[in-house]
Amino acid sequence: MSLKKYKAHLTRRYMVSASHRLHSDELSEPENDALYGKCNNPFGHGHNYMVEVTVSGPVDPETGMVCNLLDLDGFVHAEIRERFDHQNLNLLPEFAKLVPTTENLCIAIYEILKRGFKAAHLEKVRIEETMMNSFEYAGD
Amino acid sequence: MSVVYLTRKAEFSASHYYHNPKLSAEENQRLFGKCNNANGHGHNYVLEVTVKGPVNGKSGFVVDLRDLKEVMGREVLDALDHRFLNKEVPEFFTAIPTTENLSIAIWQRLEPKFTAAQLHRVRVYETPELFVDFYGEA
């Protein structure tokens, strides 16, 4: 293979288990119930979120890598899993004023990566809340 | 003409290790960790090949799947399946057989073989938790 640099996209999947309750303080109880249904249960409920992080960049001929997986794993474990895994999302500062929908979780995780992970270009964050639904944010 | 994307999956099992002979043993260990074990280790790779093109008016196909399967088998699976990538696949006598380089090598093997449809993406899963997409971009 030539030493020419090619651009590749690398995706890594991480599991984050957390609980949440969808509830907006701006709405009445009947409105919350109508909007969020079962997700508005006052005691909350949980998911195994599959968080997919996609980064891109030239493949370094010295390493064969877009970025070192040890660096990406280290960052995600320290900055994302430490913060969200086995937590009640509603009690975290990120969601003090924001409903912890998977849309908002996607944006929060994207912003943490965008600010702190500099080893490759962040393309997108995709989260599977369950096998049946997933959400993507690419910073638009 | 409507362009449609078609994806075909395949699986291959292979072993590899990561080592850059230009670097010291310590540097290789730091950079590649467990993947630096010289005796190698293996994965069940899953390959997804996506081609795109207009739907043929007569056949209703983007590409004849029998042809796609045959090309993937001959150009990729026969060469990689149940092989030690570093020792048996020429691309990796020099390049490090990372998932990035595997997807580039597979692209380069397949791309010249397509005439009717156009190769769009090569996706290689090393594990269910790690995959690389290559679109032929420099």
Image: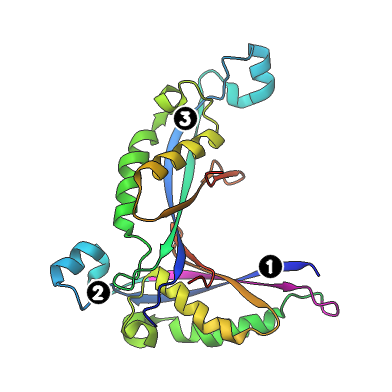
Picture quarter containing residue B54?
bottom right
Give me the residue at 38% from left, 84% from top.
B91
Element marked by disc 3: strand
Residue B68, image x and y in percent? Answer: 64, 81
Residue B61 placement, left or right of A80: right
Give the residue pinned by disc 3.
A19
Element marked by disc 2: loop
Q: Which residues are magenta?
A: B43-59
Label 3 Cα neighbours within 10 Å, binned few <14 / some 14-19 / many ≥20: many
Residue A11, image x and y in percent? Answer: 45, 57
Residue B19's disc is: 2
Q: Nearer the viewer, mark 1 or mark 3?
A: 1
Q: Nearer the viewer, mark 2 or mark 3?
A: 2
Picture quarter containing residue B72?
bottom right
Say if B69 sits above or below B128 in the image: below
Q: Main secondary structure of the magenta part?
A: strand
| Chain letter for the residue marked with disc 3 in the picture | A
Amino acid, disc 3: Ser
Q: Are marks 1 and 3 in contact (CB under 8 Å)?
A: no
Give me the residue at 61% from left, 43% from top.
A133
- In the foreground, A93 or B44: A93
- Same chain assignment for discs 1 and 3: no
Amino acid, disc 2: His
